[in-house]
Amino acid sequence: MKKFSIQEINSVLNGVIIGTTTHSITAPEQLEMAVETEISFIGNKKYEKFWESSKACAAIVNEDISIEPGKNKAFIKVKNADLAMSQVLEMFAPAPPIFNHEIHPTAVIDVTVKIGAGSRIGANCYVGLNVVIGENVTLYPNVTILDECSIGDGTVIWSGAVVRERCHVGNYCILHPNCTIGADGFGFRPCPERGLAKIPQIGNVILGNNVEIGANSSVDRGKFSSTVLGDGCKIDNLVQIGHNSRLGRFCIMAGNSGLAGSVTLGNGVIIGGSASIKDHLTLGDGVTIGAGSGVAADVPAGKTMLGYPAVEARTALKQWAILKRMANE
């Protein structure tokens, strides 16, 4: 079991210690669930009221905290408690699964594959023709990488993930279990002879560096050219990204949200859970789309949109207030 003193934790956070505790800290935990050897955090003043009943011996708190830690308890004051807590979680993180073989004997790897130094390939993986795997890549068991793909340095691909042919994954990406990179885009047209004719999808997917794709999410290949996710994009579980969509840098898509084909997102776009974006739209830099919203028109940079169909947030809130008053009349 990992244990740290409050001083050892603060040596990583570089905050200010208020109060003192004699306990060795064994884990981070939520305020209401923590025991006396655990550390928690208060990222917003509205949660100060829960500290008195918490058994935690320590908490990471924002600088504007207005309460005292109490007897045999301590605070570490920092500028951003949420970011600081992520550092603490890294300190307590357990080791990843163990590889007894750098390349497991049951892995099927084409003779043309190039594998960088320090890379590991787990049991029952398949790596196809002319794949290039960078340095310190980890493929957990049952990963499939099809022909002519490239996987950048330091990338981790978890079990069940599939990277289809001719797709390219950047450096330090994380692909979670059962996600699919490069499935066919959804392209069909009515046809008198066949009912629905499938439109070939001959493009690929390009993921930038530090991209993370959640479990069971899908990024479809382009019909032409590429579906592109810029550096630092973070995609939640159960997300659909349609063919030929292009995401800028540091975009976020929450669970069950989706982009139809040929959507363009600027940098820093945030899309809430279960939101849907119509095909061929452009959302400018810094746009936020609220959970469950349906976007049917382009959105200028910096706007926040809510509702179905989505309108500017202030307009949506006014509409909802009017409907609520009408319902109460």
Image: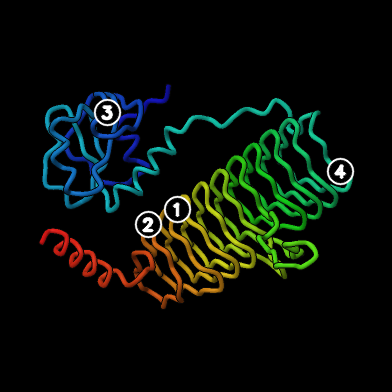
Amino acid on which disc 1 is placed: Ala
Q: Three-letter amino acid code at disc 2?
A: Ala
Amino acid type, residue under disc 4 in the picture: Asp
Callout 1: SS: loop
Calculate the distance from the C-alpha at mark 2 to the C-alpha at mark 1.
Answer: 8 Å
Residue 323: give x, y in percent of width and height: 20, 64
Separation of residues labelled 2 and 4 (CA atoms): 44 Å
Residue 295 is tagged as none
Give the labeled residue for mark 4.
Answer: 110
Q: CA distance from mark 3 to mark 4?
A: 50 Å
The answer to which of marks 2 and 1 sits earlier in the sequence is 1
Q: Which mark is residue 291?
A: 2
Say whether disc 3 or disc 1 marks the residue closer to the N-terminus: 3
Question: Which residue is found at the position 53% from the left and 68% from the top?
Answer: 248
Residue located 35% across and 28% down the image: 27
Real-space CA distance between mark 3 and mark 1, rounded to the nearest whole angstrom: 26 Å
Residue where numbered disc 3 is placed: 33
Percent coordinates x, y for residue 38 in the rendering: 29, 28
In the displayed structure, does residue 256 sit left or right of residue 47? right
Mark 2 or mark 3: name the one nearer the start of the chain: 3
- Of labels 2 and 1, the one closer to you: 2
Q: Amino acid at mark 3?
A: Met
The answer to which image quadrant residue 97 occupies is: top right
